[in-house]
Amino acid sequence: MKWGMLMVALLAVLSFGATSCSDDDGGGQPEITGVRVCDPEYADSLFTKSAQGQTIAIIGKNLGGATKVYINDQEVYFSPTMNTDHSIIVKVPSETDGFRLTAFNSELKDEIRVETNHGSAVYGFKVLGAAPSITRIQGSYPRSAGDVLNVYGLNLYSIENIYFTDVTAEALDTLEWEDVVPGNHTAVADYEIVSQNRYLNSNQNYEVSSQIQLVTPSLAFDEGTLVIECAAGTVYIPYTKVPGKPVISSINTDMPIPGTDLIIKGREFVQIESITYGDVTLTGDDFTVADSEDAIIIPFKQKPTAGSGTTLTVTTPGGKATVDYFYVYDGLLLNFEPDYATDNGWGPNGELMPEATSAGIPYVSDGQFWRIKSTDAGWNWWAVMCYFRKDWNGNSFGLPGFDIIPAETPAEEVYLAMEVWDNNTDFGEEQYPFMHYQIQTIGDAQTYVFENFIQNDVAYKEKALRAIDNTQPKEQWYRHVVSLGNFDGWAGKTYADIVADGINQIRFMHMNWTGTPSTMDVMFDNVRIYYQK
């Protein structure tokens, strides 16, 4: 919201809170009667909690002449020109600005304190951390009263209630409810916070890896939901007395290179009977399940046969979990094998590498691969590249059909993906160095570009050579993705538009628009189209 619009909203909010002035307004004992947010839709509502970064209006009496405002015992800036006898406007600070939460600093108070030249006023108020989530429950089966369960998640702090409900999580996903979770509740009376590990995530926001240990109460149902109410929100996860249906939350890559590990993350990986993909079936000794039952590690040895299927399935006594987009050969654009595509041969060209050996990096590969090894002295706008076309007739590489990627899928959910080995490239800050991505459509009719150097922009935060979780792994094969919605010609378009345009040429190029010398050493394989909601 622009500043002018924000002021209009604030005036609308404050107009709801205006009260008649007594003769001693501005000189009497100050009082805070409430806090409002700057959204006119909620202008008649008072709040005792706020997210970080929220602009709020402190409403009360005799607030004129304020000298200091404190939130959580920490002084915050306010504009004297926006200070009246009835209101003070402030912005709640963020942890990334150095603001401390009471959840991790017990000596601080959950309150707003306003000091004026004629007294002070206090109002109970809590600044919230990041939204909570539960990732998994770990414990033995079958479960009964008195059993200890370990609950893992993110931001499980400032806990207000923990209980079980007899309504299933699947039903909660579809029911309409606000403050009160439906069903018959059984409270958890005995629980302990085992660990709270606070850190900056890949998007440079603070989050907390949490573990809670609880004693299962006596439950009258075999299937329901565990609910945790935190100050920042209510979260829940399925609970069953016997092994539940497995859930896959992510895989580290949809096209692993033989010799690397395929890692499946999720929950309820209990007594796994088989893992299948295409015409390959794995059992027993073919994989390892983490003690926490939330990860499966597969030393990947065998690719599925093309045409044998694109679904990966984990089967347990509790049911099946699937990944619908796995080894989609129809989406493979470049694998650097003979006659698969045509090298334009432009210089300076990267190097076609033979199959890797254990004698040197990258140690394993899926046959031939491409390497961009480039050093410059700075101010480099044209350097070593990988530049291939489907053919000289202007045709498109093959793309997955609409039965695999629905036509209406937003371009932002369709990715240019590839396996990458980054040999410790130092990407530094901002524009140094980066990759230039270029796609040319059927007949070279259009040229769409994405330049992956905007690393520090608050609204964007996309790292060079990012994995889908926005990390930059080193010295290992991993899946690098670039949303096709980032390319200037496909922003806001659909997959149907992408298919209509087609892809005839692809280029990756090392660039460096600073005066600082740089070196890039990156290997690529299995460049493809990938789909993830």
Image (cartoon, grey):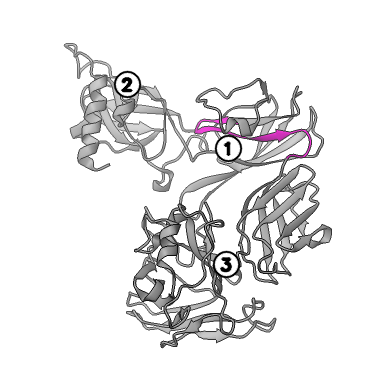
Q: Earlier in the sequence, mark 2 or mark 3?
A: 2
Q: Which amino acid does label 2 sit on?
A: Asp
Prevailing secondary structure class for the magenta stretch in the rendered image: strand
Q: Which of marks 2 and 1 is in front?
A: 2
Magenta-span inclusion, residue 241: yes
Residue named by callout 3: 330
Q: Can residue 276 be seen in this view?
A: yes
SS of the residue under disc 2: loop
Residue 423 in the image: state x and y as whole percent.
55, 75
Residue 518 horizontal side relative to residue 3, left or right = right
Tell me which corner region of the image, top left, top right, bottom left or bottom right, holds residue 279.
Answer: bottom right
Residue 327 in the image: state x and y as whole percent.
63, 64
Q: Quadrant of the N terminus?
A: top left
Asked if labels 3 and 1 touch by Cβ distance under 8 angstroms, the answer is: no
Residue named by callout 2: 44
Residue named by callout 1: 156
Q: Which of marks 2 and 3 is in front?
A: 3
Residue at 50% x, 59% y is 470
Q: What stretch is highlighted in magenta?
A: 228-244
- Residue that lies at the very extreme toward the top in this rendered image: 23
Q: Pick the residue in front: 64 or 285.
A: 285
Q: Which of marks 1 and 3 is nearer the N terminus?
A: 1
Circle 3 Cα neighbour tier, 10 Å, few/some/many (<14 / 14–19 / ≥20): some
Circle 1 Cα neighbour tier, 10 Å, few/some/many (<14 / 14–19 / ≥20): many
Q: Which of marks 2 and 1 is nearer the N terminus?
A: 2
Circle 2 Cα neighbour tier, 10 Å, few/some/many (<14 / 14–19 / ≥20): some
SS of the residue under disc 1: loop
